[in-house]
Image (spheres, grey):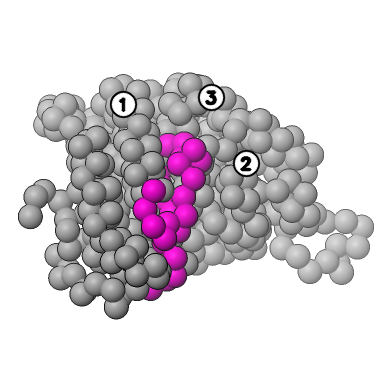
Amino acid sequence: MDQVIDLRSDTVTLPTPAMRRAMAAADVGDDVYGEDPTVNRLEALAAGLLGKPAAVFVASGTMGNLASVLAHCARGQEALLGDESHIYNYEAGGASALGGVVLHPVRTAPDGTLPLDALEAAIHLPDDNYHLYHHAPPGVICLENTHNRCGGAVVPPRYFADVAAMAARHGLPVHLDGARLFNAAVATGLDVRAWTAHVASVQICLSKGLAAPVGSVVAGAGPFVNRARQVRKMLGGGMRQAGVIAAAGIVALTEMVERLAEDHAHAKILAEGVAALPGVSLNPAAVQTNIVVFQSGSVRAAAALVSAARGQGVLLSDFGGGRVRMVTHYGITADDCHRAVDVLRGVHEPAAASHRPLTTGHRPPATDH
């Protein structure tokens, strides 16, 4: 078999040679004492790029979002967020389990926004009859950009401005899960501050498309970052001589942002090729960044497709509900994308010949590797 093409996620991205050199040469100290010069440099760099006064380096995007929510909310308060958001679906309920924060999901539109009327209706504030009120009070509104479960959709800055205005009327902060925020910036040609100007806090991943091996950054006002840093400590996130990994994050922010355009172009190759396959529902024009999500019929059909593609060396993600996800990243080439399309065309041929949705009965199950 040829080399495996791993399209499951951009979390599988390997660090660049420049990152490995920077990690080997990193000047380090004890970050819990604030004495790691490389971590300090990364935090200052990220804060400047994001237009915020301060930043803190954390181990992961999940830790960054959790630290942010717990820094904004007291126990028993609500975090208002999308029902398709990463925080709600993929972060193990940490805000509730560890911080006593109620996750209040709001319907997510296909473009990744939360309808403003639905979001405002979810904000339950105290009134003169508060002793009769039964809702948990709101603590923070969480948004996501780009939006993972909406196929890497770019949520526009004007929407963030609208939410910020609503939040200000109710005295609420807005947190941005910006794990792939730089993808949004590159796709639109806008500075990331077009989004971060409207939020109190933001989390960005240095891994994923930016290719660092580990780490995220949380940015916001100084008092907020101090609280987030305290929560990081509570979560066991004091990483001591963390400059070894922060060095790769500096390379990610200084050398890898514009390269994201390659991932977007490669995602278009996948989208256009897959959209032509029988039994697939996908609009290539809707693919904006590095994530391609398509409908492959039934739940069984999607599972069979993922299994069959794996048998041919192409790794995909079963995204639930008959959907399949593909994600491009550093290390995936245009040729890889063309070969992946060829593989998917091959595993679809039995379904096309029979004019029936692909099921596990149309092809022998592939051996898992």
The disc, 1 or 2, on the residue closer to the chain's N-terminal end is 2
Instruction: Give the structural element (helix, strand or loop) at label 3.
Output: helix
Which of the two residues, 27 or 366, is positioned nearer the viewer here? 366
User: From which residue to which does the magenta span run?
Assistant: 276-301
Which mark, by number, is residue 147? none
Residue at 54% in and 56% down: 84
Mark 2 is on which residue type?
A: Val
Residue that carries the numbered disc 3 in the rendered image: 193
Residue 336 covered by magenta stretch: no
Mark 3 or 2: the one toward you: 3
Residue 283 covered by magenta stretch: yes
In the displayed structure, does residue 191 sit left or right of residue 18?
right
Residue 69: give x, y in percent of width and height.
54, 50
Toward which corner of the image does residue 125 lie, by quadrant?
bottom right
Residue at 42% in and 37% down: 289
Residue at 57% in and 30% down: 195
Residue 293: give x, y in percent of width and height.
43, 51
Residue 343: give x, y in percent of width and height.
22, 53
Q: CA distance from mark 3 to mark 2?
A: 14 Å
Residue that carries the numbered disc 1 in the rendered image: 259
Which of the two residues, 235 or 273, is positioned nearer the viewer here? 273
Marks 3/1 in contact by CB < 8 Å: the verdict is no
Indicate whether 286 appears above or below 18.
Answer: below
In the displayed structure, does residue 129 sit left or right of residue 23?
right
Instruction: Give the structural element (helix, strand or loop) at label 2.
Output: strand
Marks 1/2 in contact by CB < 8 Å: the verdict is no
**Quadrant where the image shows the N terminus:** bottom left
Which mark, by number, is residue 174? 2
